[in-house]
Amino acid sequence: MSSRHSPTLTVMVQAARKAARTLIRDFGEVENLQVSVKGPGDFVSAADLRAEETLREELTRARPGYGFLLEEGGTVEGTDKSHRWIIDPLDGTTNFLHGIPLFAINIALEREGEIIAGLTYNPIADELFWAEKGKGAFVNDKRLRVAARRDLSQAVVCTGVPHIGWKNHATFSKQLAEIMPQVAGVRRTGSCAIDMAFVAAGRFDAYWESGLNAWDLAAGIILVREAGGTITDLNNKSDVLGTGSVLASNETLHRPLINILKKAGSA
């Protein structure tokens, strides 16, 4: 464990690694279930809940009064009204369900409405992305910086593609049609957490998506900011958690991308 970790970050890392041990074991079973007629759906739902319970238990033990915003468990009020954990135990559930090794545990700590620490852990790759306010962003022990590319034509950008049950297919199609001809490539990993971590790491030059939840975004917000990136909602405002939309990139690419997305009609 890094000597740079504060006591709070250490608690977050320990909780994530404990939950990850079960998820890795469950993922191995999911791979076996791909060939069954019923499929692994119910099993994955149970794995998701198990991971969330582990995270909640570990974090409550270390910080008893803090509240929670949980993907599965909803809002849990704490006696300490100024601190709240925002948790997604399995971001990239559909990938997990299909045996695709691109998923992550997301933990963020909010103090008085501001994200002050965030962690995204991809247990299969054993990449632990983490950041604390004012201390920079890291993957394991390596310092992160967003990519320095200044030309959109050289940029690789990522996004989330709307699926069945979503209402913004038409808007997304317009956004994609505007962006595709202007960039070097568009990617889709199936995990918002990994997308934002990869922007912080300089692997992707930008990421945009809408229709997201606080637990998808909270950890990534501080990762990108502490890696020197710019992050707003698709209206170029700061209320990313409130709107559930996001554009994350370096400062130079942010303006042209916002303009393109506005032209297409932001969802």
Image (cartoon, rainbow, N blue to C red):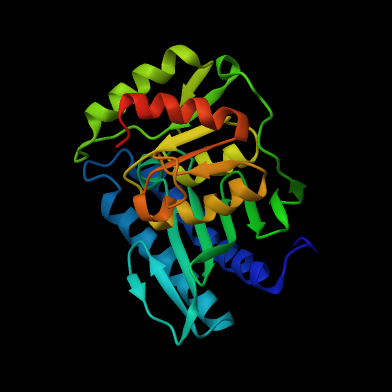
Q: Which residue is situated farthest in the right direction here?
A: 3
Quadrant location of the C terminus? top left
**Image: 53 above or below 24:** below
Residue 253 lies, in percent from the top left, at 57, 28
> Taking the image as drawn, is residue 25 in sight?
no
Q: Position of residue 263 (x, y in %)?
A: 35, 24
Q: Quadrant of the N terminus?
A: bottom right
Q: Position of residue 88 (x, y in %)?
A: 43, 58
Question: Residue at the location (37% across, 55% down)?
Answer: 242
Q: Is residue 76 above or below residue 40?
A: below
Considering only vertical position in the picture, is 26 above or below 262?
Answer: below
Q: Count all numbered tags in the image, as a single digit.
A: 0
Residue lying farthest bottom?
A: 79
In this rendering, would 145 be left or right of 59? right
Nearest to the observer: residue 210 or residue 121: 210
The x and y percentages for residue 105 are 50, 55
Residue at 54%, 32% (x, y): give it.
Answer: 254
Is residue 221 visible in the rendered image? The answer is yes
Residue drawn at point x = 35 percent, y = 50 percent: 243
Viewer-closest of 50 and 38: 50
